Image (cartoon, helix red, strand yellow):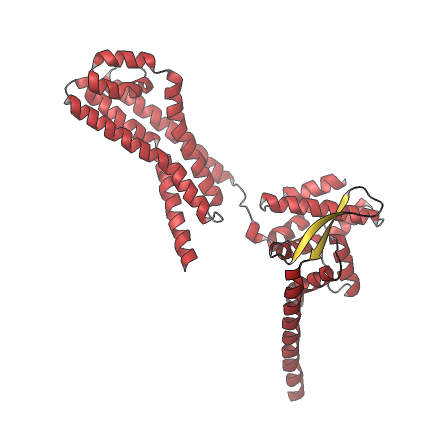
Amino acid sequence: MTEKEYIKSILKNVYLRRDIKKRVAADLENDIFSRRTAGEDMNTIIQDMGAPISVAQSLNDEMSEFAVPKRSLTQILVLFIIITASAALVWGVGTAMEFIANIPFIPNKAASIGIIGGVDGPTSVFVASNIMPSFIVIISTAIPIIIGSFTAYMLMKWQKLGSRRLFRNLAIFSGILPIIVIFQILISLISAALSGFAVPIDASMLMFNIISPLVKVILPTITAIISLRMYLKKRKSEKL
Amino acid sequence: MEERYARQLKKGVLELIVLQLATAKPVYGYELLSAIKEKSNGMLALKEGTLYPILYRLEDEGMIKARWQSGEGRNAPKKYYEATEKGHLALCEMQDTWFALSACVESFIVEEDKHD
């Protein structure tokens, strides 16, 4: 085993913060060099320092305060299920709404034209559906899912070790979307109310405008609530 | 039992010994390991996995600081650890604690022996 391989296999089994790992790497390199200068060969060095796993084990044990939890298969699986389920929900609600409304547009487009449709009727529905490029619709669907998944992942990773500040930032970050969505729904409701719920198409549009964003922000809302709770818990425990 | 007990005891004093050595002169990791092993006749022999955490703890608390310094006959700089002013002060306190503690423990042992 060469010096580099030895250090690499130690670091592979060290589950500590990245900055600590960097320190360990620098010190190992330094000390192995010193030993070599003192005339030891690599085999003697490994014998004396110990097998990579046992060196890593003792570093992990002695510095457990800097530990980073190993990502387990379950966590990755849960993340995958969450992403798939949210995508399926968004798609499912879209399809269902399309079926109910029997609108010849793709559901994502229908979502983007709802407000104008509510105010002005079929003419502007036609206009809006042509103006709104579909990639924006795709992004607006993808962003909540991405943000939700990201924050959910961060929460899983930092559940035990996260600082108060981290949870505060996570709560703000994932909380922005639900707040925007609430405004969106309010605007939908107001515009629908202004039009007097007159045309049947508006009712289904209104339903779509309320349910679709709600489904999209389920994940960010959940993570926002959990992060907020973690933040409050940390703050309380720090005060004590 | 004996081994676990010895390990626990050593753990507490190693920090004091490492700081003591770093106060005398700037030292690098391997130098510390060999110095401790030699002076203690192998009784306090420790490995990198135990030494680094002690060094990092002392460094994070500002008692020692790491410095890269070019060694003799080599181009790549070597990482040296040396005690800071805070480290010097902390060492004095640690020594006081050690003397007080060892005297106290000794008095127990001696007293018990007298009763026997």
Q: Residue at x 79, y 49 (%)?
A: A34
The C terminus of chain A, quarter of image? bottom left
Q: Residue furthest front?
A: B85
Residue A235 lies, in percent from the top left, at 40, 53
Residue B10 picture quarter: bottom right
Q: Position of residue B101 (x, y in %)?
A: 63, 74
What percent of the width, then of the height, locates residue A1? 76, 40
**Could you say which is closer to the camera, residue B13 or residue A12?**
B13
Name the residue: 66% across, 56% down.
B64
Residue closest to the far bottom: B115
Left or right: where A62 falls relative to A199: right
Question: Which of the pair A224/A184 is nearer the observer?
Answer: A184
Q: Nearer the viewer, residue A37 or B90?
A: B90
- Residue B68 in view (yes/no): yes
Q: Is residue A167 left or right of residue A123?
A: right
Marker count (numbered):
0
User: Residue placed at 60% from the left, 53% from the top?
Assistant: A63
Question: Looking at the image, can residue B4 be seen?
Answer: no
Please identify the quarter of the rendering in which residue A206 is found: top left
Left or right? Give the position of A141 relative to A36: left
**Residue B110 position in % (x across, y down):** 67, 83
Relative height, residue B87 to residue A109 (above, below): below
Residue A179 lies in quadrant: top left
